[in-house]
Image (cartoon, rainbow, N blue to C red):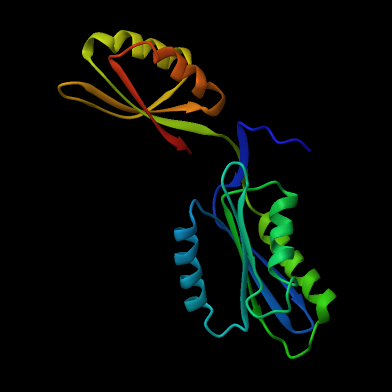
Amino acid sequence: MELNADKYKTIEAISEGLYKEKGSKFLSFAIPVKSVDEIKEILVDYRKRFFDARHVCYAYMLGYDRTEFRANDDGEPSGTAGRPILGQINSRELTNVLVIVVRYFGGVLLGTGGLITAYKEAAADALNTAEISERTVRNAFSIAFGYLSMNEVMKVIKELNAEIANQTFDNECNMTILVDKSQAPLLVAKFENNADVKLDDLGFR
């Protein structure tokens, strides 16, 4: 399936799931995230919260282009936990999401196949109850200009259906604007011949 480069899918809020097999309990949590630093803080919190659990496994996907990801088995046999969790994120084409699966060992070994199934089903249960939304990739720009260019700038913002995230007016006007990724080159082109307007690309959101 070809992804729309201007769109991405993520979850709106934390959702939970549960899978049980031969006495073992797999508690799952799907969490919306935006950065690796945020993920690290969440993992510390969950490991404290479930300090008595045998394993706290996870996988995450970040970025509108879904290029930053990781899967962690946390002591389970290699490939039996993190990878099945990541597989559930991928099968739904989600990003900016962290899925944690906490295992309480029930005394019976599940084997490689059993573990893969358990972590997959636990992750699926959390994601199945999540509210999934489609969002547009937006490019942020800071824009500074003199008052004489105000009408021109506001006209372009309206034409491109851009959003003014914040603005300050002092000796000159300063704004942070958000524009759909596909419109970003057009925004740059609109002002490239206006020396009074200074654009700074702040990257994608």
138, 121: nearer the viewer: 138
Q: Quadrant of residue 31?
A: bottom right
Residue at 75 percent of width and 51 percent of height? 91
x and y percentages locating residue 185 in the rendered image? 51, 21
Q: Is residue 106 above or below residue 201?
A: below
Snapshot quadrant of residue 64: top right
As drawn, is 143 to the left or to the right of 46? left
Give 169 or 23, whichever is nearer the viewer.
Answer: 169
Q: Residue at x 68, y 67 (%)?
A: 82
Apparent side of residue 189 relative to residue 153 in the rendered image (left or right): right
- Place of residue 192 in the rendered image (x, y in percent of width and height, measured from the top left): 40, 15
Above or below, 135 relative to 29: above
* Residue most extreme to the bottom: 107
Q: Vertically, is 77 above or below 1? A: below
Give coordinates of residue 120: x percent, y percent.
Answer: 75, 65
Query: Which residue, as the protein is rendered here, is positioned at the far left?
Result: 171
Instruction: Examine the image and state in which quarter residue 7 appears.
Output: top right
Q: How many marks on residues? A: 0
- Identify the residue at horizontal 44%, vertical 22% (top origin): 162
- Which one is in front, 148 or 124? 148
Q: Is residue 98 above or below residue 107?
A: above
Q: Position of residue 123 (x, y in %)?
A: 69, 63
**Residue at image coords 49%, 51%:** 34
Q: Quadrant of the N terminus?
A: top right
